[in-house]
Image (cartoon, helix red, strand yellow):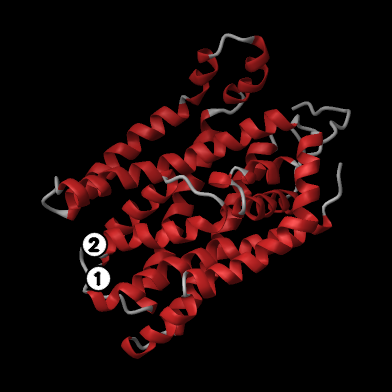
Amino acid sequence: MQFTNTLIPANRNIQTIIGIARWVLLPLTVVFIVYKLLYAYEFDSLLKSYQSLFTPDYTLLLAAACLMPVNWMLECMKWQKLVSRYENTSFNRACAGVLSGVCLSIFTPNQIGDFAGRIVQLRQLNKLKGAVVAVVGNTAQMAVTLVAGIPALYMLLVNGFETYSLMYAAVGMLMLMVVYLYLNLSQIYKLFSSPRIKKYTVVFTDYSRPELLYIFILSVLRYTIFVAQYLFILRFYNVDIEVPVAVTCIFATLCTQAFVPSFLLLELGLRGASALWFFGMFVSNEHVPGILLSAYTVWIVNLMIPALAGMVVLLKWKIQ
């Protein structure tokens, strides 16, 4: 494997974004998070009103929290594997890129800041090509979300499956189809004729099938961990719902959240609304606060905490 000898300078637009983010947007984001949680979404009030209805088992919350670093470790492993095709990248460097991306994604439309956060940490790889590398990883994660979510949405909204086992069988068959398509990701390169575009989309042809399968497996593991975290937190808030039903609702909720346009931290409200839409079909009104608290807690554990860690990374970041 050959690596570029000359260091490619960071794109000036990205430098400007990071510069603004470091000293203006990041502190404002912290204030905005507190405001949204305590006032706009009344997390504190919801919790107080619901405390009389549930007996918390903090081991469940601890289990969900302990799975968070495992979840993001898998994502860092994915990013390191993808980038290592073009430059030597340590695991710590990969973690810095991922955490920077999480932080910037918090206050950018549809989390597009995730791309900027990752590519600014690259030392040799062209930044635009680095963005395409990120697409390779994100495509795998999005594919898993769709594979699980589409049958769940069909079952909940159309009631097309008589049993949950049939839905899971549909998920399994879809998964096999998507794996086959993902392993043939190189075909995307043929869709473009412009040489200027092809010099970046050539990335799709650079990965072998074993490498792509490795990325896809890590994506499945991440999704599984996320579902487990959601289940633990639902149980923590004593939301009375059977596991197969809960898993189906989680699949549908995550799929919906992946495609609903969002900006800034407004997605937190969308997370609560989408979760309430699906879980509300199966629980009584007294558990509505528990559903909302679960959605918000999942966001706090999996995004807010890593985003704060990413903020520290960005404040220490030096333009390469």
Residue drawn 80% across and 41% down?
15
Across and down, in percent, residue 229 comes to 44, 66
- In the structure shown, which secondary structural element does the residue marked by tag 2 occupy? helix
Q: Residues within 10 Å of mark 1 (few under 14, many from 20)?
A: some
The residue under label 2 is 245
Indicate the amino acid at tag 1: Ile
Which residue is at the front of the view, 15 or 80?
15
Which residue is at the front of the view, 215 or 237?
237
Looking at the image, residue 195 sits to the left or right of residue 249; the answer is: right
Cα distance between the residues tagged 1 and 2: 7 Å
Across and down, in percent, residue 214 comes to 52, 41
Across and down, in percent, residue 61 comes to 47, 77
User: Above or below — where is 314 with respect to 2?
Assistant: below
Q: Residues within 10 Å of mark 2 (few under 14, many from 20)?
A: some
Q: Are marks 1 and 2 in contact (CB under 8 Å)?
A: yes
User: Above or below — where is 5 with respect to 139?
Assistant: above
Q: Give the number of the disc on residue 241.
A: 1
Looking at the image, residue 188 sits to the left or right of residue 206; the answer is: left
